Image: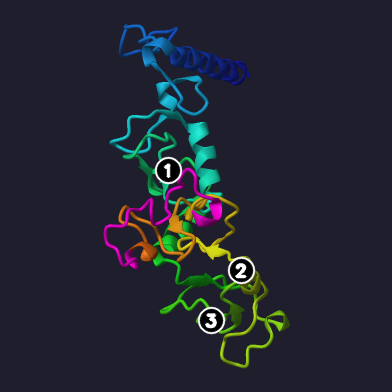
Amino acid sequence: MANAAAAPACAASDDTYLQELIRGSVPGPSSSRARVAPLTDDEIGWFCCGICTERRLVLDRFRAGARCAHDFCIECVVRYIEGRVANGAVPVPCPAPECRDGVMHPEACKKLVDIDVFDAWCVALCERAVGPARARCPYRDCGELVALEAADGVLSEVECPTCSRAFCLQCEEPWDERHGGGGGDGRGGCVLAGLAVGNKWTRCPSCRAMIDKIDGCRRMLCRCGTSFCYVCGSPVSEKGCRCFFAQEDPALTLQNAGFECKSGVSIDKC
């Protein structure tokens, strides 16, 4: 009985010894040296987040790329990525406005964001790579991304190659009686398309969002980051757009072509 009572006491003593050994208060059996003290926060280092401007440990530092020198805390970066992905504004650049080298990649940020955000990020990048000639099947049990060989601005009814159900290319809604008057040629009347024509809206060539210009010049900057011409709907580069190249005078500048607001000129003529 004495041996049975002494066993729990020995086990408790061993547990206490192990806990003290882990904390470093008792030298280990193979070494008499004391444990190295952990680094202090000042020894680890600090940085200032470029978004929240708070002082953070360098362990919490994030940079958009190898060539980017702007520092941000992980919490701010996650919120920034979530906002950009929710708006379809991909690729996701460095949050610093003056930065031209930093671009965030989904795989590099996979451990930071939720899996839903990561999936939506990848899908948005794929859709942007396909271009404006695309549409997504609106049926919940399908959702297939449909790439169109020829994107006609008049064409309305298309058929999903996966589920074989028809939907409207203009508003990306199931094809029903609201899209009547088609005559079987896929060119039925869409309410959204009618409003776009009546109000002279233009669709973004990247994310396909409808844009309504209230004032300013015809160079639009969509929330997805794409710069395009409001008149012809084509992306604007340093050389211009389709409107610019269609001018008879090749010496016409971008400003004269209407891409920049000019002083003393009315908005309607800009």
User: Is residue 76 depicted above or below 220 in this figure?
Assistant: above
In percent of width and height, residue 139 lies at 62, 73
User: Is residue 215 depicted above or below 17 in this figure?
Assistant: below
Residue 194 lies in the magenta-colored region: no
Name of the residue lying farthest toward the bottom: 183
First of labels 3, 1 by sequence position? 1
**Residue in front for this viewpoint, 15 or 146:** 146
SS for tag 2?
Answer: helix
What's the residue type where badge 2 is placed? Ala
Q: Where does label 1 land, which residue? A: 109
SS for tag 1?
Answer: helix
Q: Would residue 132 be found to the left or right of residue 178 on screen? A: left
First of labels 1, 2 by sequence position? 1
Residue 196 tag number: 2
Main secondary structure along the magenta-highlighted residues? loop
What's the residue type where badge 1 is placed? Cys
User: Is residue 113 depicted above or below 146 in this figure?
Assistant: above
Alpha carbon separation for disc pair 3 and 2: 14 Å
SS for tag 3?
Answer: loop
The part of the chain drawn in magenta is 245-270
Q: Where does label 3 land, which residue? A: 155
Residue at image point 42% right, 34% down: 96
Residue at image point 39% right, 48% down: 107
Alpha carbon separation for disc pair 1 and 2: 38 Å
Alpha carbon separation for disc pair 3 and 1: 39 Å
Residue at image point 37% right, 29% down: 70
Quarter of image, res 125? bottom left
* Disc 1 residue crowd, few under 14, some 14–19, many 20+, Cα 10 Å: some
